[in-house]
Image: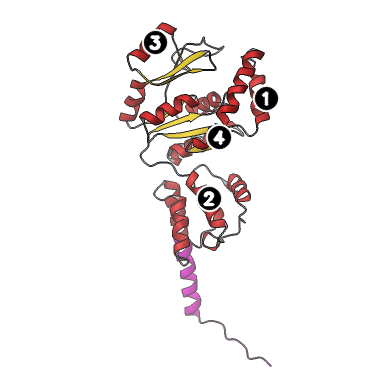
Amino acid sequence: MSPRIAPPPDTDRAAASRAAVAARRARAAVKTAIESGDRSALEVAETAWRDPASPEATLRITDLLTSIPGIGRVRAQRFLDELGISERKRVGGLGARQRPRLRGFLRTRQPRPGNALHVLSGPTAVGKSTLSEFIRESYPQVYFSVSATTRKPRPGEVDGVHYHFVSDAEFDRLIAAGELLEWAKVHNAYRYGTPRGPVFDAIAAGRRVLLEIDIAGAWQVREQVPEALLVFLAPPTWEDLVQRLSGRGTETPDEQQRRLATARTELAAQGAFDRVVINRDVVTAAREVVELMGVPRGARDF
């Protein structure tokens, strides 16, 4: 007959219970630090891999991802599926192949501390204007540059709100006076440009600035403001982009073909951008852009 194993003394059980509570509190503190922006998820993961006994190491991978502003349970699960990582894993328990994949992903989720200027660009018809309007309405603390353009207003567009609609002569004057941060001729038709003064006034006032501009303009901003964060808005598929363009009905068939030809070239440029956001739906894409801008979690309205 096997000897009976005596239950642990009450003092041992109490000590184990206190240790478990302390561990939970330590993990909760790690999650709070990520949510508040005091620590990055990448730094937490690197700490976990250096110290297997740390609270960071025992943090569940799902808890790590959902601590990142803008990532909920559903998006976290989608990201884990794409990374090939089980939701049951703890950060410190990831294997040699999983760690580089997670590290690369977390690097793309980090805002640039102290950076105030952000550029949103992408191919024609990808939904930049719709996305910008959604962020504008949800986040009044984000300053949106109003571009100048030589094209005519589309139905519903308001001068000074959506664009500054100017003549070719006035656009020439803005260029000559050095009043544009960037400008370009788009689709071999109209010129667009970003007035310089309002952008730097907003930055000086401590506001985060978002420029919605074309790709040529993004390169000009990069030359003048190297620390600017360039975000590329991409369609889920090429077919989706074609459908968006043909469905909005604002261009003639010939102009649609010109824009699609330009879009193929523009899509090839996404690898040179700092971040890429897939525009599967407006709400999700907006959350990702705002997250990259480093807007505090408590300030988000959706």
User: Can the viewer see residue 187 in this picture?
Assistant: yes
Crowd band around label 2 with a 10 angstrom C-alpha radius: few (<14), some (14–19), many (20+): many
Residue 107 colored in magenta in the image: no
Of tags 2 and 1, the one toward the viewer is 1
Of tags 3 and 4, the one toward the viewer is 3
Crowd band around label 3 with a 10 angstrom C-alpha radius: few (<14), some (14–19), many (20+): few
Crowd band around label 1 with a 10 angstrom C-alpha radius: few (<14), some (14–19), many (20+): few
Q: Residue 120: x and y, percent? A: 48, 30
Q: Residue 212: x and y, percent? A: 47, 25
Q: Residue 152: x and y, percent? A: 51, 9
Which circle marks residue 65 in the picture? 2
Which circle marks residue 243 in the picture? 1
Disc 4/disc 1 C-alpha distance (Å): 18 Å
Disc 3/disc 2 C-alpha distance (Å): 49 Å
Disc 1/disc 3 C-alpha distance (Å): 35 Å
The front one of 300 and 295 is 295
Residue 9 colored in magenta in the image: yes
**Residue identifier under label 3:** 172
Asked where in the image residue 168 lies, by quadrant, the reply is: top left
Which amino acid, mark 1? Gln
Task: Answer above or below: position of 244 versus 23.
Answer: above
Among numbered discs 4 and 2, the one appearing first in the sequence: 2
**Residue identifier under label 4:** 285
Task: Answer above or below: position of 63 versus 262.
Answer: below
What residue is drawn where x is 36% and y is 29%?
224
Query: In terms of secondary structure, where does tag 1 sit?
Result: helix
Which amino acid, mark 3? Asp
Q: Are marks 1 and 3 in contact (CB under 8 Å)?
A: no
